[in-house]
Image (cartoon, rainbow, N blue to C red):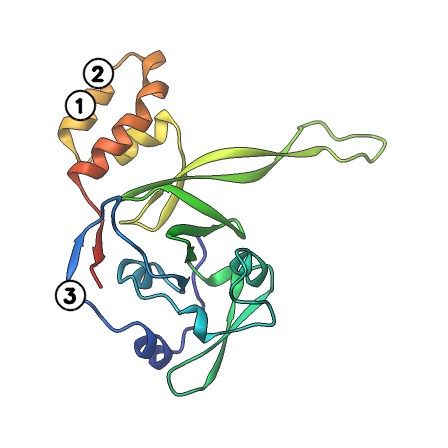
Amino acid sequence: MKHLLFINLFFISSLCPAQNDSIPYSHEFEFNEGIYLTFSSFKQNKPVPVSAIVSGYPKNQLDFFTEVTREKTIQVKDNEGNLQKFETKSIWGYCRNRSVYINFNNQFSKINVIGTLCYFTATVTRSMGVPDPMGMNTTYEELHQFVYQTSTNKVYDFDAKNMGILLKNDDELYTRFMAMKKRDKPDAIFILLRKYNEKHPLYISGK
């Protein structure tokens, strides 16, 4: 996961004041719409609002964020009217129509399950493994499952091996998972991810 190499701290503090009123995330929670420069701004529910984004695209269009994030940089104005520019590849994600999108592998993918462990799918490019002597394209794209661990800011392939790693700090779930037969583990990882999030909720600012 890539982060901002440089952020104007005054700008961040002016748009994203610190919050101490965090509550456990639930499906009823409504995220504020805008761009999350960092994971911290996501947890604070303090994105850069649409009104602060400087763009030639109509802000009332459903694909506004899709179009804006296709650009190499995103320009925004802080509360003092100063123009700031950020590399699109460095922002954490954005929220549109109550859905949160995470920036991974230079594409923005919707988070299908939000929690301490976030689940999402993204398109990845794979190699066919054998070079084509005629110079034809030997790569293809496929949809792949991932899990984002919020405590470490790391993204893992969503598979049985990695779930064994991610469940280690919960003795009950880890023991239950490791006691399963190998063939049963792939079918259980999604259920265990949800149970882990129930036991270890992600806390988000309530305002």
Quarter in which the C terminus is drawn: bottom left
Q: Which residue is mark 2?
A: 179
Viewer-closest of 151 and 192: 192
Q: Which residue is mark 3?
A: 20
The mark tally for this picture is 3
Q: Which residue is mark 1?
A: 175
Instruction: Please tell me whether mark 3 sits on a helix, a strand or a loop.
Output: loop
Work out which residue is located at the far right of the displayed protein and give it.
Answer: 134
CA gap between label 1 and label 2 equals 6 Å
Contact (Cβ within 8 Å) of mark 1 with mark 3: no
Q: What residue type is disc 1 on? A: Thr
- For this view, does 164 lie left or right of residue 95? left
CA gap between label 1 and label 3 equals 34 Å
Viewer-closest of 173 and 82: 82
Q: Tell me which numbered mark, 3 or 2, is placed earlier along the sequence.
A: 3
- For this view, does 166 lie left or right of residue 65? left
Q: Measured from the top left, where is residue 83 in percent x and y?
A: 49, 82
Q: What residue type is disc 3 on? A: Asn
